[in-house]
Amino acid sequence: MKMKTTLFNNISGDENSDQLNNNILSDEELWTDLQGGSSIAFHQIYQRYVQVLFNYGKKFTNQRELIEDCMQELFTGLWKYREKLGSVKNLKSYLLISFRRKLIPELQKANRLTEINKKNVRFEIVFSPERTKINEERQLEQNQNLLNQLNSLPERQREALYLRYYEGLSCQEIAEIFEMNPQSVYNLLNRAINLLKKRLLISILILFYIFFHLSE
Amino acid sequence: MNKEKHVDQLIEHPQFQQWVKNPDSQSDKYWEEWMGDNPERVEAVDLAKKVLLSISFKEENMVEREVDVLWNKIKVGVQEPYPVHVKTSSNPLWWKYAAAITAILVCAFAYLVFIQNEKEENKTAVVYLEKTNQLGQKATIFLGDGTVIKLNSGSTLKYPKVFNNDERVVYLEGEAFFEVAKNPKKPFTVISGKIRTKVLGTSFNVRAYPEDNKVQVAVLSGKVGVKVPSKESLVLLPNESAIYNKSESEVKHAKVDMEKELAWKDNIIYFKNADFEEIRNVLERWYGVNFLLKKDVKIEYDFTGKFENRSLESVLEGISFSLDFQFEIDKDTVVIF
């Protein structure tokens, strides 16, 4: 068994930082170990990404069984074909892409049989806990308007937002998932960001206005 | 518009994203210093922060048990011999533990080989294990193939220590919820009295108490085949059930409310238009008590309601009020009058 220690740099960003102790391997090291047949590396990859994948799956459907079946298939395949898989640049985006490729056809199959899943808003944008703290009524109302506007963006645009700003994938990687060119992904995201900037600037201005008005 | 550009730069900055999402003292310090050095960008930071915080999604995680169950299934799904996984620690004592564990594994392995040889020699019948829950008791059983079974109170599950090569068969008396690990080559069969429930990999609930007149199989996911003697096999889909009436030897295929059927797993008693007979059976098993009905007591109403982690007394208080009866609890006996 291999024992490696890598210094963990807190600011460089790995969301698992809290559950890690000092002999944590990087994704690249885990991948190499997995290809060499290390079951411990396999388990660590599972532990590191099980919630990321489940969370992503839940954005498409509430059918937990289906999500878990696809995850099972994904990981089983990962172990079985580990030697043939070649090198992987970014493990997280690799897993997200492979998972999505399994999940989408399964969902289409399942939804042809049952009609239950239709009501579900996919990739719904919600209040972040930080924003919910602000309980100024007027602001809440404005936030709600903003949310509605965000949630009426096309589903694909919201998924891009999710992958870019929630999971931290690059435009290049998202382009691979959507099978489109990176520039289009960039434009897709930019449209949403511009909308947000505009809306937020306006609401800041309104608040300022109210503030000065009241204090006069 | 230089300002706008600054905002965009911050929004795309990985460390900045990280700080907005999960601030800690280290990153707080870093960005405060940064703003001190770049006072003209404080506004940009504020707006960029607001933008990123507006893009928020619900966090939906699996609970620890689900993570373990899924891992168990994956391990089983991996066909080739899978090396035993031992949890490691960074403690210097690690090597000692490893040595000790290795020694134990070697012994266990030797023991298994020995047993295996013995079995091979005198091809005896399959060894069965049996788990019986007393009234008022529940248990979770993890089978070697990755299947997880939650066994309700007053129920017995009999299962082979090791499944043979071409099928998985278990015997149930009472009620259990099955989450069967997928294996298309080895169907999984639950035998409960005269009813056989056969699946490849799904989750479903079987209620087959010997003292009840009805046996019910209810499906949460996947496809389930149910075979009743001298009847065609029924195929059940999610949210469907088969109800077998023992005295009339009749089977009914019906829609079912899975939330109600599976409430027991989460320690919830759930009645829906339940008559007194049903209430009595459920409570007797759940709390391990006997009901004694005084003469002339007639209870005609139905009851609908949920109880979560409640004492027998408080459950009975709720029900007696709407069904209009009095009760007294004396040790293991509930007297109804």
Image: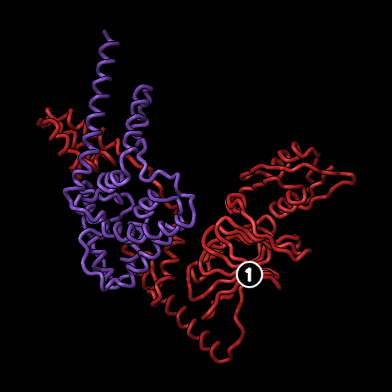
Chain colours: A purple, B red
User: Which residue is farthest right?
Assistant: B295
- Residue at image mark 1: B233
- Which residue occupies the foreground of this view, B297 or A172? A172
Quadrant where the C terminus of chain A is found in the figure: top left
**Image position, residue A37 (x, y; %):** 30, 73
Q: Quadrant of residue A46?
A: bottom left
- Which residue occupies the foreground of this view, A158 or A140? A158
Q: Residue at x 22, y 58 (%)?
A: A90
- Which residue occupies the foreground of this view, B25 or B177? B177
Q: Quadrant of residue A53?
A: bottom left
Instruction: Report the side of B78 relative to B39 (left or right).
Output: right
User: Which residue is farthest bottom?
Assistant: B121
Quadrant where the N terminus of chain A is found in the figure: bottom left
Q: Can the viewer see residue A166?
A: no
- Above or below, A106 against B61 in this view is below
Instruction: Report the side of B329 relative to B262 (left or right).
Output: right
Q: Residue at x 44, y 60 (%)?
A: B68
Q: Quadrant of residue B1?
A: top left
Q: Looking at numbered disc 1 in the image, what kind of residue is underneath it? A: Ser
User: Which residue is farthest front?
Assistant: A112
Q: Can the viewer see residue A159?
A: yes
**Image position, residue B101 (x, y; %):** 41, 72
- Above or below, B220 against B165 in this view is above
Instruction: Report the side of A158 relative to A6 (left or right).
Output: right
**Image position, residue B32 (x, y; %):** 18, 33
**Image position, residue B228 (x, y; %):** 68, 69
Q: Which chain letter matches label 1?
A: B
Instruction: Report the side of A181 relative to A78 (left or right).
Output: left
Q: Kindly state the secondary structure of the residue where label 1 is placed.
A: loop
- Classify 10 Å Cα crowding around label 1: few (below 14), some (14-19), many (20 and above): some
- Which residue occupies the foreground of this view, B208 or A186? A186
